[in-house]
Amino acid sequence: MRRVEDALNKEMKDRSFARAYSEERMRLEIAHRMAEARHKHHLSQTTVAHRMGVTPQAVSRMEKGLLNLTLGSIYKYAKAVREPLVITIG
């Protein structure tokens, strides 16, 4: 594992890599939290999709971090799982 950490630390010195890495981590963190919220309320992807007006496949892709989500999409998802959308900057 140390070799992986060393390689990552070396790559993080490259500003463009560090920026892309940070953006991807953020995208995956949001996706993970979305899925957690759905599970918390014992909802299926199909139920969330129906409430959002999208397909279950779209919800799956959102929760896997495969889509570049807009704030509007995240808001619709939060509303569908009946959770408040809280944004913190800083």
Image: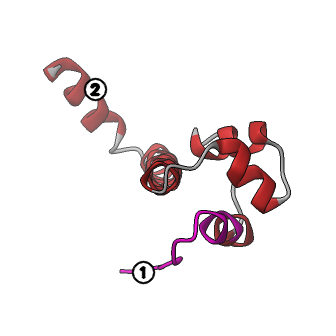
Which residue ends up furthest to the left in the rendered image?
2
Q: Is residue 25 above or below residue 81?
A: above
**Who's the residue at 49% across and 46% down the image?**
28
Left-right relation of 85 to 67: left
Q: Secondary structure at mark 1?
A: loop
- Separation of residues labelled 2 and 1 (CA atoms): 29 Å
Pointer 2: residues within 10 angstroms few (<14), some, or many (20+)? few
- Quick one: quadrant of the C terminus? bottom left
**Who's the residue at 58% across and 38% down the image?**
64
Question: Residue 77 sits in which quadrant?
Answer: bottom right
Which residue ends up furthest to the front in the rendered image?
42
Q: Secondary structure at mark 2?
A: helix
| Magenta highlight range | 76-90
- Quick one: quadrant of the N terminus? top left
Q: Is residue 44 above or below residue 41?
A: above
Left-right relation of 41 to 6: right
Image coordinates for residue 53, horizontal then vertical, percent = 85, 58
Q: Nearer the viewer, residue 5 or 39?
A: 39
Disc 2 marks which amino acid?
Ala
Camera sees residue 12: yes
Q: Nearer the viewer, residue 72 or 37?
A: 37
Residue annotated with mark 2 = 7
Left-right relation of 35 to 9: right
Image coordinates for residue 6, horizontal then vertical, percent = 20, 28
| 71 inside magenta stretch | no
**Who's the residue at 48% across and 53% down the image?**
19
Q: Nearer the viewer, residue 65 or 79?
A: 79
The label number, if any, that marks residue 89 in the structure image: 1
Image coordinates for residue 21, horizontal then vertical, percent = 45, 45
Mark 2 and mark 1 residues within 8 Å of each other at the beta carbon: no
